[in-house]
Image (spheres, rainbow, N blue to C red):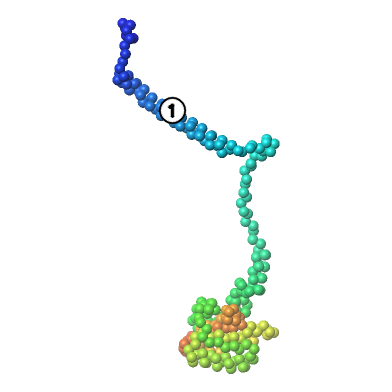
Amino acid sequence: MNAKGRCTFKSFEELNRYFSKNGLKQHLRQTTRKDKRVQDTAASQSDDRRIFKEAMRDVVPLPGSNRREAAAVRVPRPSRKPVDEEASAIARLEALIQSGVGFVVSQTAEYVEGTGYRVHPALAHRLHRGDFAIQSHIDLHGLGVEKAKERFDRFLADSLRTGKRQILIVHGRGLSSPAQPVLKTRICEWLATGPWRKWVIAFTSARMCDGGTGATYVLLRRRPLTRRFKKKSPSRGWSKA
């Protein structure tokens, strides 16, 4: 109403300009979007409740006296029990006795090893490990010392003549000897200090599959050492582990 008491009307364009000027149009739009989100959320919650009630329609609740609150179940971690060293040692001993598992020939008192002049000990380790193929062998087990020496000499002479490089000599462990093994000890002496020493590169006790400490591998030279080398240094001989 104007000053003269008459009512006046404004067009819609004027109202829009008024609302735009005062920021009401934007406010109305924000309010409308907010209301719509609230309505959507309420509708979604209503749908969830309806679905839950539909799913639980046939479920009968327990009486109050039979209800039990489910406590959180704590799963214990598996504990690492300390290894029984005595039981483990017994198991290893049984395996060693029954099948020979864990037996190392080179770690026994019966193991023998020898190398010639300027031969690195690692070569003897390779020989015992089986890195060289056996090309010939002889069995002297059970023979007397004299008979064994005759066969030993013939065998080495024949091996050198035919170009054999690694040979195997079976002599037995000599466990029946009252002191040390007789034949085994003599063979080591013949290889280390006898006339055959100039042909010997190295010798070691054999692996279990070839006789163990009851046999000896011998690695032979292609050519013998000369006197010049023998004067410089004697053979390194043989040793027991």
Task: Look at the numbered disc 1 and give the secondary structure of its residue.
Answer: helix
Q: Is residue 55 visible from the viewing direction of this image?
A: yes
Q: Is residue 169 left or right of residue 232?
A: right
Q: Callout 1: 10 Å neighbours few (<14), some, many (20+)?
A: few
Query: Residue at image x 31%, y 5%?
Result: 4
| Residue positioned most to the top | 4
Residue labelled with disc 1: 35
Provide residue 87's location: percent of width, then percent of height: 67, 65
Under mark 1, the amino acid is Asp
Q: How many marks?
A: 1
Q: Residue sitting at 64 percent across and 37 percent down?
A: 61
Q: In the depicted view, which residue is nearer to us: 66 or 193?
A: 66
Residue 14 image offset from top left, x and y in percent: 30, 18
* Residue 217 position in % (x across, y down): 55, 83
Does any portion of residue 239 appear in the rendered image? no
Looking at the image, which residue is at 51% across and 32% down? 46
Report the quarter where the N terminus lies: top left
Tell me residue 159's x, y (percent): 51, 90
Residue that protrudes farthest toward the front in the picture: 58
Q: Is residue 78 above or below residue 118?
A: above
Specify the quadrant of the image occupied by residue 73.
Answer: top right
Q: Nearer the viewer, residue 75 or 30?
A: 30
Task: Name which residue lies at 53% across and 34% down.
Answer: 50
Q: Is residue 60 above or below residue 137?
A: above
Give the quarter of the figure containing the C terminus: bottom right
Q: Using the image as rendered, state which of residue 204 and residue 102 is in the foreground.
A: 102
7 vs 198: above or below: above
